[in-house]
Amino acid sequence: MTTIVQLRSLVRQITTIDSSADLPDSLIDTYAKDGFQRMLNLERRWPFLEVTYTMNTVANTREYLISSISTGDLREITSVVDTSVAGNRLHLIGTDEGERIWNGTLDVASRPLYYAEWADTLSLYPKPNAVYPLTIRGYRKPSYTWLTVLAEEIDCDERLHFAVVYYVVSQVYKRQEDAELSQMYEASFNSAVALAHEELMRSPSSRPMILSGGNVRGYNYNYWLQQLGRTL
């Protein structure tokens, strides 16, 4: 576990710069945030960002702000499951496809079967005719409270913590115009991130990766219209 306090101490031990006047905490924190963001930009689906949230639909309401779901830190959705009755996994469609089918007199409220994402909005098709409990899984936005909450660890897997230290040290040496040491610690940063990324994103031994074997497949959306016509 590495907190911002421990990170500052490690950086000062490595660089032997003890004076806060020569190396203020605010500068270390800025470098740490930069290194942290660079790591996260490498991969959108870091396992430590996985989350599961729940929400309830509102009758006759199609659109829900993603930022209003749970704690508001949901970045992207990977699955939506209606947990009422026997349960049903909603399938992802394009917003334009939903608008094409469920419009005008055909926009009849019913149990949601599909969902779409657009402009930070989750849209359900058809719009719910009652309250349905939904379980939403996806990936959250990273937290930066570790920069201000001194006892909180860096918001990533522990195997990535020391990579942030390497990055800060490289930037400190770059500030001192020591190109050789700066490049050496930047290389250590890149190596540490690459190794951790390979390990964290590796498929579990019990679940080998099968290329093109996902659950994504085409759906005949007109089937919904045909079923609707039979019941009108």
Image: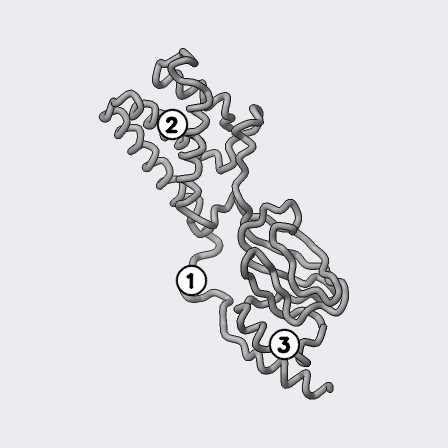
Q: Which residue is mark 1?
A: 210
The quadrant where residue 55 appears: bottom right
If you read the primary sequence from the N terminus, does the residue marked by circle 3 or circle 1 appear first? 3
Residue 23 vs 201, above or below: the answer is above
The quadrant in which the C terminus is found is bottom right
Marked residue nearer the N-terminal end (3 or 2) = 3
Q: Position of residue 75 (x, y in %)?
A: 54, 50
Residue at (49% x, 68% y) in the render: 216
Mark in the foreground, 3 or 2: 3
Camera-nearest label, 1 or 2: 2
- Residue located 73% across and 62% down the image: 132
Q: Residues within 10 Å of mark 3 (few under 14, many from 20)?
A: few
Relative horizontal placement of residue 135, taking residue 23 as reference (left or right):
right
Element carrying mark 2? helix
User: Could you tell me which residue is drawn at 44 percent across and 57 percent down?
Assistant: 208
Q: Which amino acid, mark 1?
A: Ile
Residue denoted by label 2: 168
Q: Which mark is residue 103?
A: 3
- CA gap between label 3 and label 1 equals 38 Å
Vertical placement of 127 versus 8: above or below?
below
Name the image quarter holding residue 122: bottom right
- Residue in the image at 63% along x and 82% along y: 225
Q: Nearer the viewer, residue 97 or 89?
A: 97
| Front in this rendered view, residue 193 or 109 | 109
Q: Amino acid at mark 3?
A: Asn
